Image (cartoon, grey):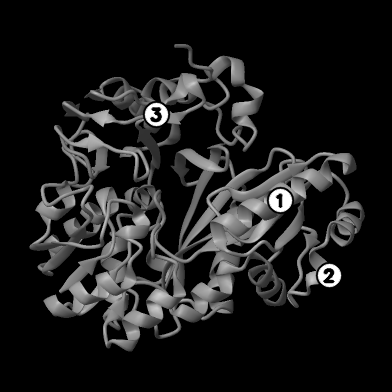
């Protein structure tokens, strides 16, 4: 029996696999989501938690979640992504009450939560890291403007200032020249303190227009580690991914192999167990060079495209590993077939700086049945936590759905993605669908391996949305 400590799309996704495996499920919901939300209706049991509608009053209340878990007699808790999914204290709390967290051990979460500590671990393990400065000692004098500026000058501008406990693009500033450093550092430290309760930062040499490629790894408790190939997540806005694809296109076989090997090595270095993602930046100015960026100690939003090319249900593997089983396949038994894309459909105003939108969705008809996996006839999959008549509110991420397509090769898959986006029907809230179509139909996006993290800056006029 599994409790899903999350909401929306990812809660529905976990419940779907549990249903297929015959595992009873328990859902939780906030006062804002209510008992009629889709994930609550899909589960065998559902219970309201918290004292209010905000995440801090509901899905970020570990004691409330634990109370429901104990009262319902669950064996395991699946945290999904976001909320408490990378919270080591919550993981400890779950295991201390003789339940299983469907995820990595708290020690791995702690090691990877700090960007400075994670870089030190990767360097020791022989995984290439971006040139920069990080302080393992946590000395206050190593966080002053004067000291960090001296390190930035040594590294060479441009540099990236990053919160050591950061994530999701928060606590990050790009500094192009020395005169900008003071203000950028202070702003970054304020944001880091507010978002993560820790103002410490590290410095990295800024790679101009890199590709963002991540490796999906899975490890069991018996010492086995495999990678399920890689995903290219280079199309980003403010460090948030927009369209992802798998496998990464136009990579030489030796580079692809080295990425997978280093992903597995990173997992071994922290004693990792369960599903995780190791993110790398590929230097486009020096082909073949790549550097460790960070490790996400949870299931990624974009995991479905890996499932599409491998035929593996990653949530099933997570559950089996949490139950103590050996990995279902060895590395030699894993293959990548075809190509897949995922586009994130959001309720937002692309013409107004992508401001989140709210309102009631009175019509929602995606181009394939929702939450049923990939349609065999069309090769289209839609994962969502939304149903017609539901309100998109102000309290949570405004993602409506994930539109996933798969086909024999990149060209065919991209054509299918565009057709699916054009056939996606939704009314009641503005969305980013037209923006996604502009990106997907851009000539540069159509070229294998041509997209880097600067795509939206380089082609701003081409994809700009007007009122």
Q: Position of residue 204 (x, y in %)?
A: 76, 55
Q: Is residue 267 left or right of residue 299?
A: right
Q: Residue at x 38, y 37 (%)?
A: 344
Residue 33 marker: none
Comes first in the chain, label 1 or label 2: 2
User: Alpha carbon of mark 2 to alpha carbon of mark 3: how far?
Assistant: 42 Å
Could you tell me which secondary element the residue under label 2 belongs to?
helix
Could you tell me which secondary element the residue under label 3 belongs to?
strand
User: Alpha carbon of mark 1 to alpha carbon of mark 2: how far?
Assistant: 37 Å
Q: Position of residue 116 (x, y in %)?
A: 68, 68
Using the image, determine if residue 58 lies above or below residue 452: below
How many numbered dots are placed on residues in this image? 3
The crowd level at tag 1 (other Cα within 10 Å; few <14, some 14-19, many 20+) is some
Q: Residue at x 52, y 45 (%)?
A: 232
* Camera sees residue 402: no
Q: Position of residue 113 (x, y in %)?
A: 56, 68
The front one of 179 and 400 is: 179
The front one of 213 and 348 is: 348
Q: Residue at x 10, y 68 (%)?
A: 22
Residue under circle 1? 288
Quadrant of the snapshot with the C terminus = top left
User: Alpha carbon of mark 1 to alpha carbon of mark 3: how far?
Assistant: 37 Å
Could you tell me which secondary element the residue under label 1 belongs to?
loop
Residue under circle 3? 348
Residue under circle 2? 141
Comes first in the chain, label 1 or label 3: 1
């Amino acid at each position: 029996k599994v409790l899903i400590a999350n909401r929306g799309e990812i809660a529905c996704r976990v419940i779907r696999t549990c249903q297929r495996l015959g595992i009873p499920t328990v859902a939780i919901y906030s006062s804002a989501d209510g008992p009629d939300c889709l994930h609550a209706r899909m589960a065998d049991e559902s219970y309201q938690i918290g004292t209010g509608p905000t995440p801090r009053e509901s899905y970020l209340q570990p004691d409330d979640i634990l109370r429901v878990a104990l009262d319902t007699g669950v064996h395991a808790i699946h945290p999904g992504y976001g909320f408490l999914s990378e919270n080591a204290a919550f993981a400890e709390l779950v295991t201390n009450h003789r339940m299983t967290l469907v995820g990595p051990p708290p020690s791995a979460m702690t090691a990877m939560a700090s960007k400075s500590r994670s870089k030190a671990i990767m360097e020791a393990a022989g995984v290439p890291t971006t040139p920069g400065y990080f302080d393992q000692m946590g000395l206050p004098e190593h966080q002053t403007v004067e000291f960090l500026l001296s390190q930035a000058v040594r590294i060479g501008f441009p540099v990236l200032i990053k919160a050591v406990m950061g994530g999701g693009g928060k606590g990050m500033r790009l500094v192009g020249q020395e005169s900008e450093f003071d203000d950028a550092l202070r702003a970054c430290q304020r944001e880091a303190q507010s978002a993560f309760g820790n103002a410490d930062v590290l410095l990295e040499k800024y790679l101009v227009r890199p590709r963002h490629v991540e490796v999906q790894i899975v490890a069991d408790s018996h010492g086995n580690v495999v990678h399920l190939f890689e995903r290219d997540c280079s199309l980003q806005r403010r460090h948030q991914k927009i369209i992802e694809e798998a496998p990464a296109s136009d990579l030489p076989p030796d580079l692809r192999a080295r990425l997978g090997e280093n992903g597995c090595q990173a997992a071994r270095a922290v004693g990792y167990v369960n599903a995780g993602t190791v993110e790398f930046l590929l230097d486009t100015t020096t082909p073949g060079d790549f550097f460790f960026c960070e490790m996400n100690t949870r299931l990624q939003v974009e995991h479905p495209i890996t499932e599409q090319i491998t035929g593996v249900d990653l949530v099933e593997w997570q559950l089996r590993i949490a139950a103590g089983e050996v990995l279902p396949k060895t590395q030699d038994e894993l293959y990548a077939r075809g190509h897949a894309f995922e586009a994130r459909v959001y309720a937002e105003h692309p013409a107004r700086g992508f401001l989140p939108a709210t309102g009631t969705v009175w019509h929602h008809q995606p181009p394939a049945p929702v939450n049923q996996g990939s349609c065999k006839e069309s090769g289209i999959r839609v994962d969502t936590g939304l149903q017609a008549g539901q309100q998109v509110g102000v309290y949570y991420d405004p993602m409506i759905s994930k539109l996933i397509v798969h086909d024999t090769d990149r060209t065919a898959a991209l054509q299918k993605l565009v057709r699916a986006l054009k056939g996606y029907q939704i009314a009641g809230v503005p969305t980013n669908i037209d923006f996604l179509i502009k990106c997907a139909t851009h000539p540069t996006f159509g070229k294998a391996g041509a997209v880097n993290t600067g795509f939206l800056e380089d082609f701003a006029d081409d994809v700009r949305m007007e009122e």
